[in-house]
Amino acid sequence: MKTAKRKSAAKATNGKADTATLYETANDLPKRSRVQVIDLLNKRLADAVDLQMQMKQAHWNVKGPNFIGLHELFDKVHAATGEYVDSIAERAVQLGGIAEGTVRIAAKRTRLPEFPQGIAEGTAHVNAVSMVLAAFGHEVRQSIDVADELNDADTADLFTEVSRGIDKWLWFVEAHAQASK
């Protein structure tokens, strides 16, 4: 079996040049685009890992009359988010990059708001989860546009799929706070 070859490639990160490992691949996206898309994917990976753990935080700590419904809902959102984490990470690797998805990396890079500590009541968790799902959805939708600009339709499609899923979960969570008219 052939040993994987790797090259060092310059990538732009907040205007600074950084060195990243880029494995050779027969993928026909231009190298420069792949480097930029991998960086974008790793940014969203940090957000997705953070989101996944925030869903567990809500799942573990929710209390009140709607406990079981919210406890189960937050667990389902956590599971779906795990699938998003995996898809985003695998896309970065498919392009020759390295998925940077540790909890420590996520903590440094996430753009999501911090989940409030010390809350217990269901409505407080619904509001916090709604806020973080909306923030993640916003970041993912912006990433669709960036991936399109880099001519990577597959990554844009992946982000579209994630966005669609997040919007569905946001709807499910927000329904717990919306009153009928």
Image: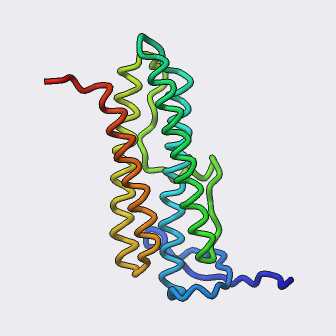
Left or right of residue 137: residue 88:
right
Residue 2 point in image, percent of width and height: 83, 85
Residue 92 point in image, percent of width and height: 58, 69
Residue 79, above or below 127 = below
Residue 136, above or below 178 = below
Give the residue drawn at x 49%, y 43%.
Answer: 51
Where on the picture, by quarter, is residue 69? top left
Furthest-left residue in this view: 181
Camera-side residue: 86 or 120? 86
Quarter of the image with the C terminus is: top left
Give the residue drawn at x 43%, y 50%.
Answer: 111
How are the colours assigned in the image? Answer: rainbow
Left or right of residue 75: residue 101:
right
Furthest-top residue in this view: 65
Numbered label tally: 0
Residue 48 point in image, percent of width and height: 51, 50
Give the residue drawn at x 52%, y 46%.
Answer: 81
Left or right of residue 181: residue 154:
right
Left or right of residue 41: residue 139:
left
Camera-side residue: 167 or 105? 167
Camera-side residue: 51 or 116? 51
Quarter of the image with the N terminus is: bottom right
Give the residue drawn at x 45%, y 19%.
Answer: 119
Where on the picture, by quarter, is residue 161? bottom left
